[in-house]
Structure formats: structure tokens, C-alpha cells
Image (cartoon, grey):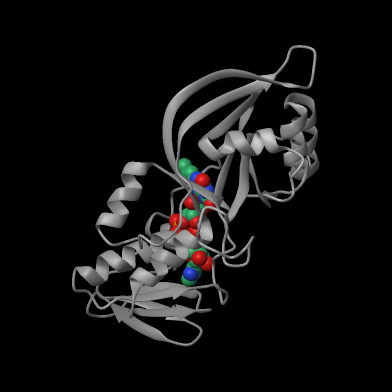
Amino acid sequence: MIGGSIAGCAAAVAGSRAGADVTVYERSEAELQDRGFGIVIPPGLHAELLGSGYLDAAMPTAPVGTRVWLTRQPGGRSVRELARQRSPVTPCNWGLLWRSLRASVGAVRYLRGQPVTSVGRDGAGRAVITTARSEEPYDVVVGADGHASATRRLLAPGLRPEPAPYAVWRGAIPLGAPAGRPRELELLRDAWVTLGFPGGHGIFYLIPGGPRDGDGSTGPGNRLLAYAIYGRPPEGAEPGPYVHELAREHFPAAWADIVARGGRRA
Ligand SMILES: Cc1cc2nc3c(=O)[nH]c(=O)nc-3n(C[C@H](O)[C@H](O)[C@H](O)COP(=O)(O)OP(=O)(O)OC[C@H]3O[C@@H](n4cnc5c(N)ncnc54)[C@H](O)[C@@H]3O)c2cc1C
């Protein structure tokens, strides 16, 4: 497996279950748990991943069953509920999800800090993976090396992936941060929230906190408020200030305030 993130770990579990002798090459030296914030998966998929043993039942999730659509009161900055629909989702913490998959990979060789520099072929037609430290032959190579995949470039040199015409701005803030917003937090205990604006939308939901968040527990008392804003920043615009300004202009004041408290581009 080239890449030891979500896809690489899941493929490593599948490969070793099928009886293969699996090696994972991961470029990054560090643990990957801080790479993402919230990741929302459908409850059916979550159940399947639990049932098949890819995820551990002890991995905390923050499931909710309702989607609430909010907007601003016309002419004001207070909130107005537009619609409410049944929409079950299973929000997860990206880092905890990766850790759980990583644990399921078990005893396979997982080589951290080892970027693959090339994939070639030996005289017997086997794939040869080269890193700065080794050159090893394999029967099967799986490219799980992300959006800028070098494996894809190798296998399909003519393929030119095009970025989607929007950017995602993600944030996750401790529940203590919007402490003056009890109504918003109360709503998020049972629902995930969508707010639209011209050309995009934002979603807000609670996710389980990790061991370094809140009280460090895996229980419902340890939550982060996660959000993702999908928009189209004008050419050359700094995404951070753009998203904060956009929220100020289009979101009800309480939700713009949440966006103003943190963020990171994805
Ligand atoms: C429709 C959609 C919805 C999404 N929703 C969410 C969401 O809700 N939350 C969220 O967090 N993300 C979301 N994402 C993003 C996606 O979940 C993350 O990007 C996820 O991490 C992808 O996993 P991956 O294993 O495919 O790739 P990556 O996580 O990018 O991992 C690739 C790995 O390969 C390694 N690598 C790269 N090159 C080499 C090399 N040469 N040698 C060795 N290793 C290498 C990298 O270090 C990296 O660890 C979404 C994506 C899509 C398409």
C-alpha cells in the first residue's frame, strides 16, 4: 500500500484478511490523527464497518437523526428556521477514525516516514517499490496516496485531475468556546445544521473530542463543534478572511460568531 491514511489502512485490512503479506509505506513521519476534523459517514456504512471489524465499536461517534436548515431573518441578523427533515448521519472525528482503522490493520508492516520515490518493474514482471531506504518487489501495488497520487501519475500519465471549483474551510472548536451560545449547542445535540449563501453552503455538527480535548473521555461529554464551509473564493482571495466575511454577511450572528472562532482550509 502506498499511503497509510484512511484508504491505505482500509485496503491493508482487506489485503491481510485475504491472506496477503501486506506492507504499508507512509510518507509522513507523524501520526496522522490531526489531518482532518469532522468526517460524516452514513449510518449504514458505519454499521457495515463495525460489523466487518474495520472499525472498533469503542470508537466514539456523535450520531444525530435530523437536518435543520437555517437562514437569517429578513433584514436582520437573528436566526430563522427554514426546514427540518429526517436525515440520520454519523459524525466522526477524523483522527479517531484513522486510529481505529490503523488499529485494525494490526501487525502488518507499517513503515512511517518512508515516501515511495518510484514504482517500477523487475525482470519477472513484479512491481518494485523504491524508497530512500529500500527497493522491494511486490505482486500487487495499491495506490492510496491521496489527491496528488504519484501512483496515478505512473499508471495513467495522461490523466489530468481537475480540482473541484470550490474550496472547503473546516473548523473544530471546543464546546466551551461558544459558551454564550446555548441555543445553538442545544440544537446541535440532536441535529446537524445547514446554512446556505449565494454560491455555497455551510454545515455544522458535533463530533467526538479526542484524548486531548475536553475531559479526554470517549463519552458524550467530550464533544467538539465542527463546521465546513463550501464556497468559491474569488481568484487570489485569502480563504480565511473570505470565509469570515462571508459568514458575517450571510449567516445569523450566532453562527457567524462560531465561524469567527477558528478554522482551517481543507
Ligand atoms: C466527497 C468527499 C467528502 C469528504 N468529506 C470529508 C469530511 O467530511 N471530513 C474530512 O476530514 N475529509 C473529508 N473528505 C476528504 C477525505 O476524507 C480525506 O481527504 C481523506 O483523508 C482521504 O483519505 P485517503 O486515504 O484517500 O487520502 P489521504 O488522507 O490524502 O492520504 C494519502 C496518504 O498517502 C501518503 N502519501 C502520499 N504520497 C506518498 C508517497 N509517495 N509515499 C508514501 N506515502 C505517500 C500521504 O502522506 C497520506 O498519508 C472528503 C472527500 C471527498 C471526496
Residue projecting furthest to the bottom: 133
Relative to 50, 178 lies left or right: right
Quadrant housing residue 50: bottom left
Give percent across and percent down for residue 245: 80, 34
Q: Is residue 186 visible?
A: yes
Viewer-proximal residue, 116 or 16?
16
Relative to 167, 146 lies left or right: left
Residue projecting furthest to the top: 74
Quadrant housing residue 55: bottom left
Viewer-proximal residue, 196 or 58?
58
State whether residue 35 is above or below residue 172: below
Q: Is residue 160 visible?
A: no
State whether residue 28 is above or below residue 78: below
Viewer-proximal residue, 99 or 65?
65
Q: Where's the N terminus, which quadrant?
A: bottom left
Q: Residue at x 46, y 67 (%)?
A: 99
Q: Residue at x 71, y 48 (%)?
A: 263
Q: Residue at x 22, y 69 (%)?
A: 17
Quadrant housing residue 202: top right
Give percent across and percent down for residue 53: 28, 62
Give percent across and percent down for residue 256: 75, 34
Viewer-proximal residue, 131 or 19?
19
Give percent across and percent down for residue 244: 78, 38
Q: Residue at x 30, y 76 (%)?
A: 22
Relative to 12, 210 lies left or right: right
Residue projecting furthest to the left: 19
